[in-house]
Image (tube, grey):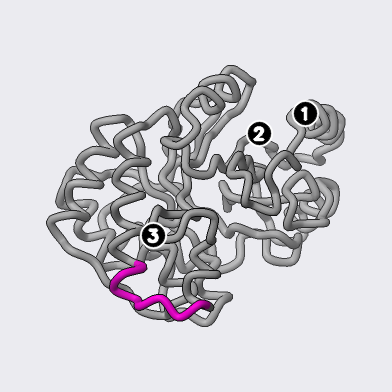
């Protein structure tokens, strides 16, 4: 098994250590872990300025010396890359194996996370419309490898709304920029019925030429490493998609 989306204490919302993940990987039979720490530049985000690539790579380098057979990969989850192009270009020069581009904010209410939008009572349709517009900008900018949790608001709204034409445009744009989707399993731990995305969106992705996906738990605790990985792998296979990992920003079919 492989987990291409994991967070440690180098992300502002986790306290877990790399070592704890390695131990858990050995117990669960996970062969590859990619540590994709949050990189946030939105000044309204509580994690803005928290991440230190120097601290991360120092810790990561030490951990790689004692992995006990587990392959460790370095990555980052860059929030709204289209809003911080110079920062993305700067960070991309570092020796990451994989970069996830995610959208946690939109222009509906600048400075508010989607969780906060939901809590403030914003209508689901309005929330999704703003989200898809932002996701389109993210895909159009490019500069990363994987489009993270494509239907992210579903995790909080517990429903999925989309315009198929808009979604197809996002997928075509992403694929043209060399970007693939991830199957993010964290929604299953948040009470959703399916992964992000589920079968329906993966079918559309496949019909637009998508062939590959990464699988990520979005774990912030070692115990969640590769959670529901088997279900995600089966979903990918049933959708006609192949699981991949990234090493040195190059896609490898597994």
Q: CA distance from mark 1 to mark 3?
A: 36 Å
Q: Secondary structure at mark 1?
A: helix
Mark 2 vs 1, N-terminal side: 1
Query: Which residue carries the number 3 mark?
Result: 108
- The percent position of residue 108, horizontal first and vertical second, equals 38, 60
Mark 1 vs 3, N-terminal side: 1
What is the number of the mark on residue 148?
A: none
Magenta run includes residue 122: yes
What is the number of the mark on residue 74?
A: 2
Q: CA distance from mark 2 to mark 1?
A: 8 Å
The residue under the point 31% across, 70% down is 126
Q: Nearer the viewer, residue 184 or 123?
A: 123
71 sits left or right of 64 in the view: left
Q: Residue 242, can we see it? A: yes
Task: Determine whether 21 is above or below 176 in the image.
Answer: below
Query: Which residue carries the number 1 mark?
Result: 57
Range covered by the magenta-colored residues: 120-127
User: Looking at the rendering, which quadrant does residue 129 occupy?
Assistant: bottom left
């Amino acid at each position: 098994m492989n987990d291409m989306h994991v967070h440690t204490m180098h992300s502002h919302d986790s306290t877990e250590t790399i070592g704890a993940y390695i131990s858990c990987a050995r117990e669960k039979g996970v062969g590859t872990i990619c540590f994709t720490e949050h990189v946030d530049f939105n000044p309204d985000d509580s994690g803005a300025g928290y991440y230190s690539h120097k601290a991360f790579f120092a810790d990561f380098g030490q951990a790689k010396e004692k992995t006990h057979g587990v392959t460790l990969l370095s990555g980052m989850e860059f929030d709204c890359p289209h809003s911080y192009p110079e920062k993305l270009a700067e960070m991309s020069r570092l020796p990451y194996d994989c970069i996830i581009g995610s959208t946690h904010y939109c222009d509906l209410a600048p400075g508010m996370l989607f969780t906060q939008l939901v809590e403030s009572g914003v209508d689901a349709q309005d929330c999704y419309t703003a989200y898809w517009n932002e996701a389109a900008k993210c895909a159009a900018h490019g500069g990363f490898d994987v489009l993270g949790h494509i239907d992210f608001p579903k995790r909080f709204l517990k429903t999925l709304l989309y315009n198929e034409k808009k979604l197809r445009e996002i997928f075509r744009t992403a694929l043209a920029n060399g970007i693939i989707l991830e199957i993010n399993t964290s929604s299953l731990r948040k009470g959703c019925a399916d992964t992000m995305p589920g079968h329906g969106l993966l079918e559309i992705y496949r019909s637009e030429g998508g062939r590959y996906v990464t699988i990520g738990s979005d774990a912030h605790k070692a115990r969640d490493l590769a959670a529901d990985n088997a279900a995600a792998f089966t979903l990918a296979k049933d959708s006609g998609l192949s699981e991949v990992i990234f090493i040195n920003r190059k896609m490898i079919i597994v």
